Image (cartoon, grey):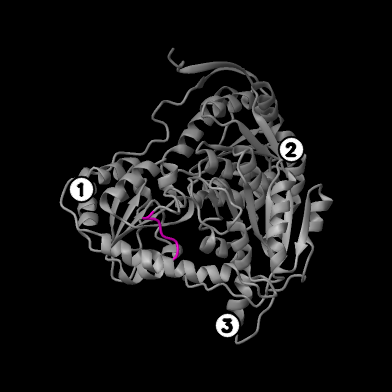
Amino acid sequence: MTQPAEQHIEGHTGQQAIAAMKAFGTDTLFTLNGAHIWPFYEGARDQGMRVVDTRHEQTATFAAEAYAKLTRKPGLAALTAGPGITNGTSAITSAYFNGTPLVVLGGRAAEERWGSGSLQEFDHVPVMASITKHAATVKDPSQGAAAVHAAARTAVTPHRGPVFLDFPFDTIFTPASVEVPVPDVCVGLGAAPDEELVDELANAVANAERPAFIVGSDVYWDGAWEPLRAAVEHLGVPCFFNGLGRGTLPADHPLAFLRTRGVLKARADLVVVLGTPLDFRLGFGKFGNARVVHVVDAASQKAEHVEVLTVAGDCNMILRALADHTGDRVDHSGWIAELRAAEEAGRAADAVLLAADAAPIKPSRIYGELAKRLERDAVVICDGGDFASYAGKFVEVFEPGCWLDTGPFGCLGNGPGYAIAARVARPQSQIVLLLGDGAAGFSLMDVDSMVRHNLPVVMVVGNNGIWGLEKHPMQFIYSGWDMACDLQPELRYDDVVKALGGAGETVRNPADIGPALDRAFASGVPYLVNVLTDPADMYPRTSNLG
């Protein structure tokens, strides 16, 4: 039986919007209640869409973004007019920089009284236009379904990103009889790449002495992890990872590397960056004397600040072409062995840090204990500065979609929202939220949302009582002086979680970390392990942020 081209629906634009999103496979709406958006709730009730409400719109929007990351379907947030939408702005901006397909539906003051000073009257569209792929107001009650369908399609089309629609109060309640479009089978697929450029890329990889791939989020978004494996195994290419690229090749694969970026920068003669920007995380596209090739999912992502060969198109098509390359190729086994030796040396050095018995506790010891307990499909979420950076250094990822970090925008407060969505989308997986104590101050109140919706999450706070990412560099630059870098020492974040209906404990001794984590994983509730760490410990940061 063929799928109908359209679905008929009788209802207001709230009903139409939910029907349009369900057609894309989206089954959860994240929100904070406001009267301007009640029709979306009515639509969700009538059509069987789950609604998860939070204590802050930023959390709801981060949750919707994480839902998209975890399911590769468009995430959905509904935000009430005015401050509800401005509260979600940072999370929407993060989605923009992360290339996440996020649909944000907003309320809006009534059109018939616009300019009269209605409650929360604010023109959101000019603000949203700068941080989304598309932003508009839906004023015609008969166009709700079509507008949301078009917006969702825009969100999932490479290069992916957030979209925004708001609905005036006097429009959203008005019923209409409409047809809801159904996405075609090609929705979300990228464009075919230039075959000559792909051939040039394949020959460059095959003939390089010391090639390497840096695998980024767009490989994950395109669902291209199997073609990636086929390509790197066929051509013998070592891989490093960035963002959602982590896990597209398992961390224990012979061609996966975590600890040897210094060797990469010093020795590689060809670096192929797959599906991630040439930004501060990657030295702005400079890797010593290596030739750099940039593979992007859409021509709009071409880097303008550096001259490199750019290949634009669907990552599946490009990687399959590399896997099918039949020309002569250089034997890369010596290069791989060099990297593997450096990787194992780095692993041995890390083992000392991961087992450190020093007091105060070194952050590395937390990750040493965590690694013993993480299952292969555990979803690890980072929300913080130095403490989260240690996670990037030590946590190994084995499956696609199991690593959620803040991304290049670096907005703290994402963690609880990401964790809420992770438990919704991956009900059988371990969900671990890693929080710096500074980051914990942004949205820890949303543990209440986890409790109300029965969403158990293991939270670990690296609590050093400072803004470590700022304090140590500031003291270095100002010869020992710093300001606005200190937090309350030994703050009991676990007591906050207990007060909200969860559980937790504070850990002061290295030997107590493992048992505390065991209790957290076994608890079945939101559980926070508050580890007091050494404020003098400084993450060995080498990247140029600007």
Main SS class of the magenta portion in the image: loop
Name the mark on residue 102: none
Q: Position of residue 253 (x, y in %)?
A: 40, 52
Q: Secondary structure at mark 1?
A: helix
Classify mark 1: residues with Cα within 10 Å, few (<14), some (14-19) or many (20+): some
Residue 354 showing in the rendered view: yes
Name the mark on residue 199: 1
Residue under numbered circle 3? 476
**Residue found at the very far bottom of the displayed protein:** 479
At label 3, which amino acid type do we have?
Answer: Phe
At label 1, which amino acid type do we have?
Answer: Asp
Residue 105 showing in the rendered view: no
Q: Position of residue 341 (x, y in %)?
A: 37, 67
Circle count: 3
- Along the line of sight, which residue is nearer the eye, 215 or 467? 215
Give the answer, above or below, for where 517 lies relative to 315: below
Q: Disc 1 and disc 3: Cα gap in Å?
A: 48 Å
Give the answer, above or below, for where 449 lies relative to 543: above
Q: Which residue is painted at 37% across and 64% down in the image?
A: 340
Classify mark 3: residues with Cα within 10 Å, few (<14), some (14-19) or many (20+): few
**Residue found at the very far right of the displayed protein:** 499
What range is drawn magenta here?
254-260
Q: Which residue is painted at 76% across and 51% down in the image?
A: 445
Classify mark 2: residues with Cα within 10 Å, few (<14), some (14-19) or many (20+): some
Q: Position of residue 309 (x, y in %)?
A: 27, 56
Q: Position of residue 17 (x, y in %)?
A: 59, 28
Residue under numbered circle 2? 33
Q: Is residue 441 left or right of residue 138?
A: right
Q: Disc 1 and disc 2: Cα gap in Å?
A: 53 Å
